[in-house]
Image (spheres, grey):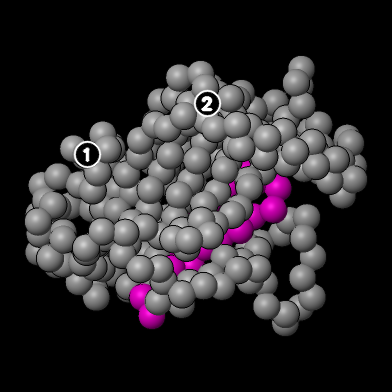
Amino acid sequence: MSNPGSSGPIRRSKVRFAVGKPEGPRSAVWRLWTNQSDVYVASRNVAVATKVSLHGSGKWRAAYHGPGLVFVDPGKDRAFDKWERPSEAVPGLTVALLIMVPSSEVTMPPHPEDMHDLRRVKIEWVPPAPEGRLTQFHVVFTTAQATAATLPNWPGRFNMGTRLIFRADLPNTETIWVVTREQPVTETIEQMLGDSRRKMIDNLKHFMGEAEYYDAPEPRGDIYGHHPERGWRYFIDFSTAEEGD
């Protein structure tokens, strides 16, 4: 986490966060990093890697990132979603992205011995939510005025019971935060998980081959969507390992 007492904004900073623990059941590892006043979010260990770019200009996008199951012609735009920065949720605070990890999706990788690098990098690990609930990470911006009014606390600490994961001050005077809290898993999310898991497993076996699929150290996928009224984007992180693997 960036130093709340630092003398000025950090022009480059980063954080990795995940649910679970490095040598046990876990989610994908998500990474947030900054470059000047631009903020980027991406995950590892997903079948189709995506990166969300939250530019200081207010032009935001989500794009396929790196190798995966989706082929994009060279020179073509890899973005599959572009949107304008949404309105403030409350004065001084803008919700940019939600990342949800249901407790059922915090699973033991089929080949955890192949993931030694997780012990060599700093990751903010969050305990899994109880059964029937999920861990929800909130990526939010605050204005300088809202930040000053919030410190030494963080968004949602008292009214939502959030836990602070990360904070960085940006050159444009805004602050980027990652906070987390637990929420119930709704029937809609359960339905989405069931449909997406089967489809993703079928796609992985088709494109990778069954042998490669079963050898994958940590097969995972995610569901991407948005709130139709407020404009927030979200990911639901899920396991694509078949039961019994």
Q: Main secondary structure of the magenta part?
A: strand
Query: Percent position (x, y) of residue 38?
Result: 38, 71
Residue at point 58% right, 25% down? 104
Which part of the image, by quadrant, shows the C terminus?
A: top right
Q: Is residue 98 visible?
A: yes
**Picture quadrant where residue 146 is located:** bottom left
User: In this image, 84 relative to 213: left or right?
Assistant: left
Residue type highlighted by circle 2: Ser
Farthest residue, direction front: 229
Residue 51 included in the magenta stretch of the image: yes
**Picture quadrant where residue 65 is located:** bottom right
Can you identify the residue that label 2 sits on?
Answer: 103
Mark nearer the viewer, 2 or 1 = 1
Examine the rendered structure and indicate whether residue 3 appears above or below residue 62. above
Sooner in the amino-acid sequence: mark 2 or mark 1: 2
Region in magenta: 40-57
User: What label sits on residue 159 in the rendered view?
Assistant: 1
User: In this image, 130 relative to 166: left or right?
Assistant: right
Label 1: which secondary element: loop
Query: Percent position (x, y) of residue 232?
Result: 46, 58
Examine the rendered structure and indicate whether residue 131 appears above or below residue 114. above
Residue 76 included in the magenta stretch of the image: no
Q: Is residue 120 visible?
A: no
Residue at point 38% right, 80% down? 57
Query: Percent position (x, y) of residue 87?
Result: 35, 68
Residues at marks 2 and 1, CA–CA distance in whole angstroms: 23 Å
Examine the rendered structure and indicate whether residue 190 appears above or below residue 50. above
